[in-house]
Amino acid sequence: MSRVIGQSPNTCILITKPSRSGAKRRVSQNKSPLLGLVKSQIPTFQSDAVLSQQFRYFVSDSYGSDVLTFTVELPQMPNGVSSANNLILLPYKAVRIKSIEMWCNFRPDGNITGNTINLTMIERRTVRPIEWSDTATFLTPAHIKKTFSKLEPLGLWYTTTGGESNPEIRFQLPKGAIMQITYDAILHDGENCGSSSGSGLSYPKVYTNSLDLNVTVVGKTYQTVISKL
Protein backbone atom coordinates (compact mmCIF):
# COMPACT_ATOMS: atom_id res chain seq x y z
CA MET A 1 0.00 0.00 0.00
CA SER A 2 1.40 3.43 -0.89
CA ARG A 3 0.31 7.02 -0.87
CA VAL A 4 1.65 10.34 -2.13
CA ILE A 5 2.56 12.78 0.69
CA GLY A 6 3.88 15.57 -1.39
CA GLN A 7 4.82 16.60 -4.89
CA SER A 8 6.41 19.39 -6.86
CA PRO A 9 6.54 20.11 -10.56
CA ASN A 10 9.56 17.80 -10.85
CA THR A 11 9.29 15.30 -7.92
CA CYS A 12 6.84 13.32 -5.79
CA ILE A 13 7.41 11.21 -2.64
CA LEU A 14 5.81 7.79 -2.15
CA ILE A 15 5.62 5.98 1.25
CA THR A 16 4.96 2.24 1.12
CA LYS A 17 3.63 0.27 4.20
CA PRO A 18 4.52 -3.40 4.58
CA SER A 19 1.68 -5.93 4.42
CA ARG A 20 0.64 -6.98 7.94
CA SER A 21 -0.75 -10.27 6.80
CA GLY A 22 2.58 -11.14 5.26
CA ALA A 23 4.42 -10.41 8.53
CA LYS A 24 2.05 -12.56 10.56
CA ARG A 25 2.40 -15.36 8.08
CA ARG A 26 6.20 -15.31 8.39
CA VAL A 27 6.09 -15.27 12.22
CA SER A 28 3.71 -18.23 12.40
CA GLN A 29 6.08 -20.28 10.29
CA ASN A 30 9.06 -19.63 12.57
CA LYS A 31 8.17 -22.06 15.39
CA SER A 32 10.68 -22.55 18.19
CA PRO A 33 12.22 -26.03 18.32
CA LEU A 34 12.07 -25.81 22.15
CA LEU A 35 8.29 -26.12 22.10
CA GLY A 36 8.36 -29.65 20.75
CA LEU A 37 11.17 -30.54 23.15
CA VAL A 38 9.16 -29.46 26.21
CA LYS A 39 6.11 -31.45 25.08
CA SER A 40 8.21 -34.60 24.76
CA GLN A 41 9.51 -34.44 28.34
CA ILE A 42 8.26 -36.96 30.94
CA PRO A 43 5.60 -35.14 33.01
CA THR A 44 5.62 -34.95 36.79
CA PHE A 45 3.87 -37.90 38.44
CA GLN A 46 2.36 -38.11 41.92
CA SER A 47 2.41 -41.70 43.14
CA ASP A 48 0.53 -41.14 46.44
CA ALA A 49 -2.75 -40.01 44.94
CA VAL A 50 -5.57 -38.89 47.24
CA LEU A 51 -8.65 -41.09 47.03
CA SER A 52 -11.89 -39.30 47.95
CA GLN A 53 -14.85 -41.46 49.03
CA GLN A 54 -18.35 -40.70 50.29
CA PHE A 55 -20.32 -42.96 52.64
CA ARG A 56 -23.89 -42.57 53.88
CA TYR A 57 -25.15 -43.99 57.15
CA PHE A 58 -28.54 -44.37 58.85
CA VAL A 59 -29.90 -45.88 62.06
CA SER A 60 -30.62 -49.58 61.70
CA ASP A 61 -34.30 -50.58 61.70
CA SER A 62 -33.51 -53.19 64.34
CA TYR A 63 -32.35 -50.55 66.84
CA GLY A 64 -34.69 -50.53 69.82
CA SER A 65 -35.03 -46.77 70.34
CA ASP A 66 -36.17 -43.94 68.07
CA VAL A 67 -32.98 -41.87 68.42
CA LEU A 68 -29.40 -43.14 68.37
CA THR A 69 -26.55 -41.23 69.99
CA PHE A 70 -23.01 -42.58 69.62
CA THR A 71 -19.48 -41.24 69.99
CA VAL A 72 -16.55 -42.30 67.84
CA GLU A 73 -13.00 -41.19 67.11
CA LEU A 74 -12.60 -39.97 63.55
CA PRO A 75 -11.14 -40.29 61.03
CA GLN A 76 -11.17 -44.06 60.94
CA MET A 77 -10.64 -46.52 58.14
CA PRO A 78 -13.58 -46.11 55.75
CA ASN A 79 -13.26 -49.69 54.53
CA GLY A 80 -10.99 -52.74 54.36
CA VAL A 81 -10.60 -56.14 52.73
CA SER A 82 -11.32 -59.36 54.63
CA SER A 83 -8.64 -62.02 54.27
CA ALA A 84 -10.09 -64.53 56.77
CA ASN A 85 -13.29 -64.94 58.77
CA ASN A 86 -11.74 -62.92 61.61
CA LEU A 87 -9.30 -60.52 59.91
CA ILE A 88 -9.65 -57.33 57.85
CA LEU A 89 -6.70 -55.79 56.01
CA LEU A 90 -6.60 -51.98 56.07
CA PRO A 91 -5.06 -50.58 52.87
CA TYR A 92 -4.62 -46.90 53.87
CA LYS A 93 -1.64 -45.23 55.50
CA ALA A 94 -3.34 -41.88 56.15
CA VAL A 95 -6.96 -40.73 56.32
CA ARG A 96 -8.68 -37.36 56.84
CA ILE A 97 -12.26 -36.13 57.13
CA LYS A 98 -13.17 -33.79 54.28
CA SER A 99 -16.76 -33.08 55.30
CA ILE A 100 -19.72 -34.28 57.38
CA GLU A 101 -23.30 -33.68 56.27
CA MET A 102 -26.56 -34.70 57.96
CA TRP A 103 -30.24 -34.56 56.93
CA CYS A 104 -33.53 -35.39 58.64
CA ASN A 105 -37.00 -35.15 57.11
CA PHE A 106 -39.88 -34.03 59.30
CA ARG A 107 -41.79 -36.89 60.93
CA PRO A 108 -45.28 -35.92 62.15
CA ASP A 109 -45.33 -38.73 64.71
CA GLY A 110 -41.97 -37.68 66.20
CA ASN A 111 -41.34 -35.25 69.04
CA ILE A 112 -38.66 -32.55 69.05
CA THR A 113 -35.90 -35.04 69.82
CA GLY A 114 -37.13 -37.37 67.09
CA ASN A 115 -36.87 -34.55 64.53
CA THR A 116 -33.50 -33.15 65.64
CA ILE A 117 -30.00 -34.00 64.40
CA ASN A 118 -26.89 -33.07 66.36
CA LEU A 119 -23.17 -33.00 65.59
CA THR A 120 -20.81 -32.42 68.55
CA MET A 121 -17.03 -32.11 68.67
CA ILE A 122 -15.89 -33.41 72.05
CA GLU A 123 -13.22 -31.44 73.90
CA ARG A 124 -9.81 -32.89 73.10
CA ARG A 125 -6.30 -31.56 72.67
CA THR A 126 -6.31 -28.82 69.96
CA VAL A 127 -9.97 -29.54 69.08
CA ARG A 128 -12.49 -26.80 69.73
CA PRO A 129 -15.50 -28.19 71.63
CA ILE A 130 -18.54 -27.11 69.63
CA GLU A 131 -21.89 -28.53 68.59
CA TRP A 132 -24.45 -27.92 65.87
CA SER A 133 -28.14 -28.86 65.99
CA ASP A 134 -31.04 -28.50 63.59
CA THR A 135 -34.69 -29.52 63.91
CA ALA A 136 -36.92 -30.52 61.03
CA THR A 137 -40.30 -28.81 60.65
CA PHE A 138 -43.26 -29.51 58.39
CA LEU A 139 -41.87 -26.82 56.06
CA THR A 140 -38.17 -27.74 55.91
CA PRO A 141 -35.95 -30.74 56.72
CA ALA A 142 -33.11 -30.46 59.23
CA HIS A 143 -29.68 -30.05 57.65
CA ILE A 144 -26.11 -29.73 58.95
CA LYS A 145 -23.03 -29.48 56.75
CA LYS A 146 -19.46 -28.94 57.93
CA THR A 147 -16.31 -29.00 55.84
CA PHE A 148 -12.84 -29.26 57.35
CA SER A 149 -9.63 -27.62 56.22
CA LYS A 150 -6.38 -29.58 56.06
CA LEU A 151 -4.95 -27.01 58.49
CA GLU A 152 -7.42 -27.57 61.36
CA PRO A 153 -7.30 -30.56 63.75
CA LEU A 154 -10.62 -31.97 62.57
CA GLY A 155 -9.38 -32.06 58.98
CA LEU A 156 -5.78 -33.15 59.52
CA TRP A 157 -4.26 -36.27 58.04
CA TYR A 158 -4.00 -39.02 60.66
CA THR A 159 -1.71 -41.98 60.33
CA THR A 160 -3.06 -45.44 60.95
CA THR A 161 -0.46 -46.56 63.47
CA GLY A 162 -1.30 -47.32 67.09
CA GLY A 163 -1.32 -44.62 69.73
CA GLU A 164 -3.03 -41.91 67.69
CA SER A 165 -5.59 -39.75 69.51
CA ASN A 166 -8.00 -38.65 66.81
CA PRO A 167 -10.76 -36.07 67.32
CA GLU A 168 -13.80 -37.47 69.12
CA ILE A 169 -17.19 -36.76 67.56
CA ARG A 170 -20.71 -37.43 68.86
CA PHE A 171 -23.66 -37.96 66.52
CA GLN A 172 -27.37 -37.84 67.29
CA LEU A 173 -29.45 -39.50 64.58
CA PRO A 174 -33.19 -40.21 64.72
CA LYS A 175 -34.52 -43.07 62.65
CA GLY A 176 -35.04 -41.74 59.15
CA ALA A 177 -32.03 -39.39 59.33
CA ILE A 178 -29.05 -39.69 56.97
CA MET A 179 -25.41 -38.92 57.72
CA GLN A 180 -22.77 -38.58 55.00
CA ILE A 181 -19.02 -38.52 55.62
CA THR A 182 -16.49 -37.72 52.89
CA TYR A 183 -13.04 -39.19 53.52
CA ASP A 184 -9.72 -38.52 51.82
CA ALA A 185 -7.33 -41.47 51.99
CA ILE A 186 -3.91 -42.52 50.71
CA LEU A 187 -3.10 -46.14 49.91
CA HIS A 188 -0.53 -47.94 52.01
CA ASP A 189 1.66 -49.22 49.17
CA GLY A 190 5.17 -48.98 50.60
CA GLU A 191 5.01 -51.12 53.76
CA ASN A 192 2.90 -53.83 55.32
CA CYS A 193 -0.67 -52.59 55.70
CA GLY A 194 -2.51 -52.63 59.01
CA SER A 195 -5.22 -55.04 60.07
CA SER A 196 -8.26 -55.24 62.31
CA SER A 197 -9.89 -58.23 63.96
CA GLY A 198 -13.46 -59.28 63.23
CA SER A 199 -15.75 -62.28 63.44
CA GLY A 200 -18.01 -64.19 61.08
CA LEU A 201 -16.62 -62.41 58.01
CA SER A 202 -16.98 -63.56 54.42
CA TYR A 203 -13.74 -63.40 52.49
CA PRO A 204 -12.25 -62.06 50.37
CA LYS A 205 -14.74 -59.17 50.46
CA VAL A 206 -14.56 -55.37 50.75
CA TYR A 207 -16.10 -54.37 54.09
CA THR A 208 -17.28 -50.83 54.83
CA ASN A 209 -16.83 -49.42 58.32
CA SER A 210 -20.30 -48.88 59.81
CA LEU A 211 -18.82 -46.93 62.80
CA ASP A 212 -21.39 -48.36 65.27
CA LEU A 213 -23.26 -51.63 65.74
CA ASN A 214 -26.59 -49.83 65.31
CA VAL A 215 -25.61 -47.98 62.13
CA THR A 216 -26.12 -49.27 58.58
CA VAL A 217 -24.23 -48.10 55.48
CA VAL A 218 -26.34 -47.18 52.45
CA GLY A 219 -25.77 -49.43 49.45
CA LYS A 220 -23.09 -51.64 51.03
CA THR A 221 -23.73 -55.37 51.31
CA TYR A 222 -20.64 -56.10 53.40
CA GLN A 223 -20.25 -53.87 56.42
CA THR A 224 -18.97 -54.15 59.96
CA VAL A 225 -17.51 -52.02 62.74
CA ILE A 226 -13.79 -51.69 62.00
CA SER A 227 -12.03 -50.69 65.20
CA LYS A 228 -9.53 -47.85 65.25
CA LEU A 229 -5.90 -48.93 65.32
Image (cartoon, grey):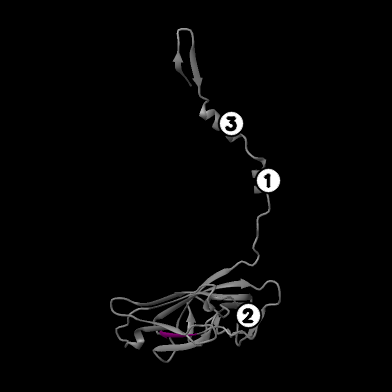
Coordinates of residue 54 in the picture (x, y in percent): 50, 72
- The residue pinned by badge 1 equals 37
Residue 95 bears which disc, if any?
none
Question: In terms of image quadrants, where is residue 44?
Answer: bottom right
Magenta range: 169-173
Give coordinates of residue 150: x percent, y percent.
54, 72
Earlier sequence position, callout 3 versus callout 1: 3
| Lateral position of residue 87 relative to residue 132, left or right | right
Could you say whether the residue bearing mark 1 is in a helix, strand or loop? helix
Q: Name the residue under label 3.
A: 26
Q: Which of marks 2 and 3 is nearer the N terminus?
A: 3
Earlier residue among tags 2 and 1: 1
Q: Tell me which amino acid carries mark 1.
A: Leu
Is mark 2 in CB contact (under 8 Å) with mark 1? no
- Which element type, helix, strand or loop, lies under badge 2? loop
The residue lying at 58 percent from left, 75 percent from top is 157
Vertical placement of residue 110 versus 21, above or below? below
In this view, the residue in front, 155 or 108, is 155
Question: To which residue does mark 2 refer?
Answer: 160
